[in-house]
Image (cartoon, grey):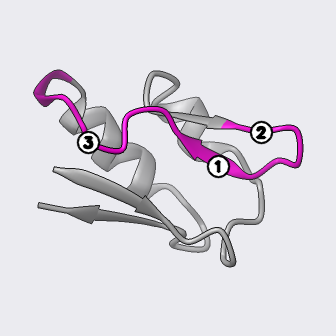
Amino acid sequence: MRIIADLDRCEGHGLCEEVAPDMYELDENAMVVIVHPDVPESLERPAEAGARVCPVAALKVMK
């Protein structure tokens, strides 16, 4: 599984980071950074949950 971020859509709400801090963080410009683009199996559920809560759909889950 991979997570892809559309940085043109990201508005820096940070909900992904709140839900899955091991997967997502915001940089100094409040843009999402994916900590593990190739998601380890142990983080698949949090990664998907973080992508789902993004209010602007900036995160895409690729299976």
First of labels 2, 3 by sequence position: 2
Please tell me how many numbered marks the rendered image carries.
Answer: 3
> Where's residue 29, x and y in %?
88, 48
Residue 45 included in the magenta stretch of the image: no
First of labels 2, 1 by sequence position: 2
Asked whether the residues under the numbered discs 2 and 1 touch, taking CB atoms below 8 Å apart as contact, a structural biologist would say yes
Name the secondary structure under disc 3: loop
The quarter of the displayed image where residue 26 is located: top right
Question: What is the three-letter code of the residue carrying label 1?
Answer: Val
**How far apart are labels 3 and 1 at the CA level?**
15 Å
- Of circles 3 and 1, which is in front? 3
Q: Determine crowd level at label 1: few under 14, some 14-19, many 20+ residues with C-alpha closer than 10 A.
A: many
> Where's residue 43, x and y in %?
24, 28
**How far apart are labels 2 and 1 at the CA level?**
6 Å
Residue linked to disc 2: 27
Question: What is the three-letter code of the residue carrying label 3?
Answer: Asp
**How far apart are labels 2 and 3 at the CA level?**
19 Å
In this picture, residue 31 sits left or right of residue 5: right
Which residue occupies 66% across, 76% down?
A: 9
Q: Which mark is residue 9?
A: none
Quadrant where the image shows the C terminus: bottom left
Residue linked to disc 3: 38
Q: Main secondary structure of the magenta part?
A: loop
Residue linked to disc 1: 32
First of labels 3, 1 by sequence position: 1
Residue 38 included in the magenta stretch of the image: yes
Magenta region, residue range: 26-42
> Where's residue 7, x and y in %?
65, 68
> Where's residue 28, x and y in %?
88, 38
Question: What is the three-letter code of the residue carrying label 2?
Answer: Asp
Q: Determine crowd level at label 2: few under 14, some 14-19, many 20+ residues with C-alpha closer than 10 A.
A: few
The quarter of the displayed image where residue 8 is located: bottom right
